[in-house]
Amino acid sequence: MKFIYKTIATGFGAGYSPFAPGTAGAILACLLLGGYIQGVGINNNTNFQIGFIIIIVLTTLLGVWATRNLQEEWGEDPSKVVVDEMIGVWFNLLFVPLTWQNIFIGFVLFRFFDIAKPLGIRKMEAFENGWGVMLDDVLAGIYGNIVLQGILYFI
């Protein structure tokens, strides 16, 4: 079972990156999203967004489950756990026209909010049982999404 927890938590191993594992996880999320876009073919319709939301919710729940089960071995929020970065990027790109340019801008915005942790993001880490690991990145993704939506509106 530990193998399954570690596979989920590390984003299929991206978290083992020796350099910037959080960034590696965020890049993986962008690439997986690109694969989803290619697989579905259309990224602006309601079915695409519903599928994307289902993926986000399921991955969030799996991420909480995996990190909760690894806390005794790995601690509260080790850098090799990157499923939270994946979720954060996806929240950041929800309801956004998914061009590679927008995905890149969303990636940069998410990493800014994830690293700087302004506006109460750090307080989300206080939640227990794997939720704190995920929720700070969810909030970083939401803030990034708001900024990205604003950029897209005014450009």
Image (cartoon, rainbow, N blue to C red):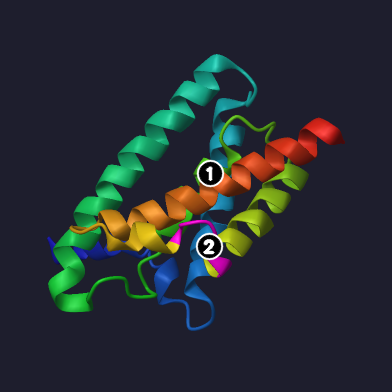
Q: Is residue 23 visible?
A: no
Q: Which residue is mark 1?
A: 142
Q: Is residue 56 left or right of residue 97?
A: left
Q: Is residue 56 left or right of residue 66?
A: right
On the image, the x and y values in percent for residue 148 come to: 70, 42
On the image, the x and y values in percent for residue 145 come to: 61, 42
Q: Residues within 10 Å of mark 1 (few under 14, many from 20)?
A: many
Q: Is residue 114 visible?
A: yes
Which stretch is magenta?
A: 116-121
Question: Which of the image's four quarters has the N terminus?
Answer: bottom left
Tell which residue pokes out farthest to the top in this image: 46
Give the amino acid at mark 1: Ile
Measuring 25% from the left and 71% from the top, which residue is drawn there?
76
Q: Which residue is mark 2?
A: 114
Give the amino acid at mark 2: Asp
Taking the magenta stretch, the answer to whether it contains residue 143 is no
Measuring 56% from the left and 27% from the top, which residue is drawn there?
40
Question: Which of the image's four quarters has the C terminus?
Answer: top right
Q: Is residue 21 left or right of residue 116?
A: left
Tell which residue pokes out farthest to the front in this image: 119
